[in-house]
Image: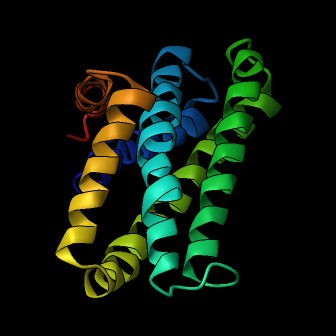
């Protein structure tokens, strides 16, 4: 849940940026590229990886259904988020050159990503995590903590988790939403 708080900081900045892009009809690549970096590497490669590789399989092993249920919905959100980030990334160069259609794609896709992740975080905080607390033992929790630490160390790299916490605060501060 702490990671959700960090992600929410950047979502607030992204919402402000999407609105600013729409209002000014111009995309500024620096901040959008920082947001893409954060969302791809912290939100997806670190946070979502922990869920997909460890939390969801453990919950499934304890009886939570995969297909058609909450886990399937959350996994679908992850995929939709990746597609929205790709749309932002692909349109950004043309948006920077002033292409009006690309500017709309960047703004709309960034805004859609924000709404998707806000709803996704609510589902996890309000439904998934309370269910997990009821389903998992303290031993399961300890195994998850160790697995999460392994993801941070081996898959994202030593110190990278902290780097993205700092970046989140820098992005939020620059957008005036911290």
- Say which quadrant the N terminus sits in: bottom left
Residue 27, percent from left and from top: 60, 23
Whole-percent x, y for residue 110 in the image: 59, 43
Query: 92 and 130: which one is in front?
Result: 130
- What residue is at 27 percent from the left and 45 percent from the top? 6
Kindly tell me whether residue 131 is visible in this rendering. Answer: yes
Q: Residue at x 41, y 65 (%)?
A: 121
Residue 161's place in the image compared with 113, above or below, is: above
Between 49 and 89, the one lying in front of the other is 49
Residue at 25% of width from left, 41% of height from top?
177
Q: Is residue 70 above or below residue 52?
A: below
State the scheme by which the image is colored.
rainbow
Q: Quadrant of residue 91?
A: top right
Q: Quadrant of the C terminus?
A: top left
At which x and y percent is residue 94? 77, 18
Q: Nearer the viewer, residue 99 or 72?
A: 72
Determine the image quadrant of residue 93: top right
Q: Is residue 119 visible?
A: no
Query: Quarter-wise, where is residue 34 in the image?
Result: top left
**Closer to us: 74 or 119:** 74
Vertical arrangement, residue 133 with respect to residue 35, above or below: below
Q: x%, y% of residue 128?
A: 40, 78
**169 horizontally vs 97: left or right:** left
Number of disc labels: 0
């Amino acid at each position: 849940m702490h990671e959700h708080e960090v992600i929410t900081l950047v979502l607030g900045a992204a919402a402000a940026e999407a609105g600013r892009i729409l209002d000014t009809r111009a995309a500024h690549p620096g901040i959008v590229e920082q947001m893409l970096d954060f969302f791809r590497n912290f939100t997806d490669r670190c946070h979502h990886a922990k869920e997909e590789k460890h939390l969801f399989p453990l919950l499934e092993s304890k009886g939570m259904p995969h297909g058609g249920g909450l886990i399937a919905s959350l996994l679908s959100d992850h995929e939709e988020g990746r597609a929205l980030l790709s749309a932002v990334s692909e349109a950004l160069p043309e948006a920077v050159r002033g292409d009006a259609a690309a500017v709309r794609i960047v703004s709309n896709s960034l805004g859609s990503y924000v709404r998707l992740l806000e709803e996704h975080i609510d589902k996890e905080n309000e439904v998934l995590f309370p269910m997990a607390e009821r389903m998992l033992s303290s031993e399961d929790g300890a195994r998850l903590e160790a697995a999460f630490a392994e993801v941070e160390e081996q898959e994202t790299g030593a110190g990278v988790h902290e780097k993205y916490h700092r970046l989140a605060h820098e992005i939020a501060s620059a957008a005036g939403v911290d």
